[in-house]
Image (tube, helix red, strand yellow):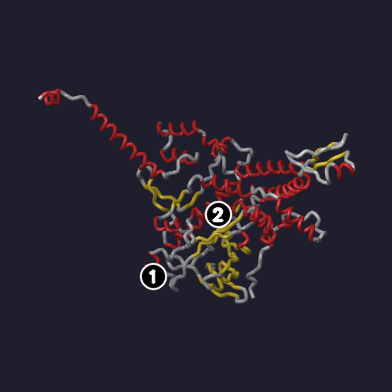
Amino acid sequence: MSNYTYIRDEVSTALSRWELVQDCVTGQERIKHLRTKYLPQPNPLDKSPENTTRYDQYVDRAVFFNVTNRTMRGLNGTVFKTDPIFHIHEDMEVIKDDVTGDGVPLVQQAKKALNYGLMFGRGGLLVDFPSTDDDGVSNTLADKEAGYLRPTVALYEPKQIINWRTKRIGAKAVLSLVVLKEDYTVDDDGFAPEIKSQWRALRLDERNVYVVEIYREGLGMVEIYEPKGADGQPFNHIPFHFFGAENNDPEIDDAPLYDLAEINIAHYRNSADYEESVYVVGQPTPYISGLTQNWVDNVLKGKIQLGARAAVPLPEGGQMALVQAEPNTLSFEAMGHKEDQMIAIGAKIIERAEAQRTATEVGAEKDSENSVLGTVAQNVSAAYTNALLDCTIFLGLPTEVTEERADGTAEQVDVSFELSTEFDQRNRDGEARRMLVEEWLHGAIAFTEMREGLREAGVAHLSDEDAKEAIDAAKEEDQKRAIELAQATKPLDDDDDEETEE
């Protein structure tokens, strides 16, 4: 019997790191719910109800300052501040608007994929295909035209990718197996679905043909099929595409946000100690000296009233004051130190790596290409580009698409998807943008080059075609108004004067 549930050692080892980051991103409710996993009990050997209650209060007072989630959302917003660039066929617009078949736009899924790259340093995209007849032809032309029979792209987080293998075909190493753990609905009464696990095995068989096998616990293999392209031929590769924090091979990369999450948890523990000390020693306590029992019984009548309108009579030489201990300042200082560390780590993710390079390399290299964020964005872009190319195979479309240049001529470009990787604030300098426009006006660079520079600076957001149409429309409107203004202010000639006098 095949061991379809087998989990590779690398995945088992990485699970605890992925869970730490995911718990931090989820937030305070999750962190506190896990209690001793992230906040050890001060006296774990004391099982008394009093100690249990004290630990409950210890957890309640602690504050989890979610820097991990804020950093992730900020990095994601940095990439998607500029819209992704699509080069796709018109017939693939439906995939752009609904990539999963459940109404999720491709850009929304790509945002989640980028988060996976930052949180875990890993993720995967599976291009899935609808069922076909035995000859590979879609069931009905009407269904195909309506968009029901089309490829979809599913996003998998790393803990779902439990097994993989590669093999060599010629000089190239290719995926020969990927096993994905999924959920499926066993039964649904309309209110509460019953969910169980299944395993999707993607294989290249002995013919080097792509085959999908579905396994379910206690049932074994329940389905096997060969997806086919528009020409009715099976695929010769597995349409699953890894993306990572370093590259897009099957190996597990380090999680960019892991170090930040670890310090975030340490900050949480310091917070618990600090809040505990504030509670224990932070309350002011009155003390009185010089009292006698006779004074307490006969003068104070056994009571002491405190407050703005209360006076406490004391015997000669008696003193009264409030004492308040200092809180644990060491925990407070440790929190501040960790906040500085978290800021530094977050900055490093977006900061380009410095290395010794030649002048030519410096001139050719984009500032963000060596940054962790830039690398993750490029890897996600490459995975989606490969996924879209697989979609063209199913739809029977060429891997190139014809697009119109700003000057009206046509060009052939590869089907692709590209996230912005320009994050350097220096590119947003106003003087640099002014020089860019001047170079275009003087003919030193093309319109498309000028627009690309403005896009990289985060200023231009329209496509070149839309921008050209908007600019031309504005020019026509300006010319029309200039003509109308000239006609309105034109002086009357002699004939006009005579007609006026008559």
Q: Quadrant of the C terminus?
A: top left
Residue 78 locus on image (x, y percent): 54, 45
In the rendered structure, which amino acid carries the disc numbered 2?
Lys
Instruction: Name the residue carrying label 1.
Output: 140
Residue 391 locus on image (x, y percent): 46, 60
**238 or 106, which lies in front?**
106
C-alpha distance separating marks 1 and 2 = 34 Å
Residue 438, by quadrant, is top left
- Please report the residue visible at 43 percent of the width from the left and 66 percent of the height from the top: 149
Instruction: Name the residue carrying label 2.
Output: 112
Residue 485 locus on image (x, y percent): 27, 30
| Pointer 1 local density, CA inside 10 Å: few below 14, some 14–19, many at least 20 | few
Residue 328 visible in the current orientation:
no
Tag 1's secondary structure?
loop
Q: Earlier in the sequence, mark 1 or mark 2?
A: 2
Q: Quadrant of the N terminus?
A: bottom right
Residue 117 locus on image (x, y percent): 59, 53
Say which of marks 1 and 2 sits in front: 2
**Vertical placement of 237 versus 77: above or below?**
below
Q: Is residue 23 left or right of residue 385?
A: right
Q: Are marks 1 and 2 in contact (CB under 8 Å)?
A: no
How many numbered marks does the figure carry? 2
- Please report the residue visible at 52 percent of the width from the left and 37 percent of the height from the top: 427
Circle on res. 269: none
**499 or 16, which lies in front?**
499
**Vertical placement of 283 versus 215: above or below?**
above
- Please report the residue visible at 48 percent of the width from the left and 47 percent of the height from the top: 83
Q: Is residue 49 left or right of residue 130?
A: right
In the rendered structure, which amino acid carries the disc numbered 1?
Thr
**496 or 291, which lies in front?**
291
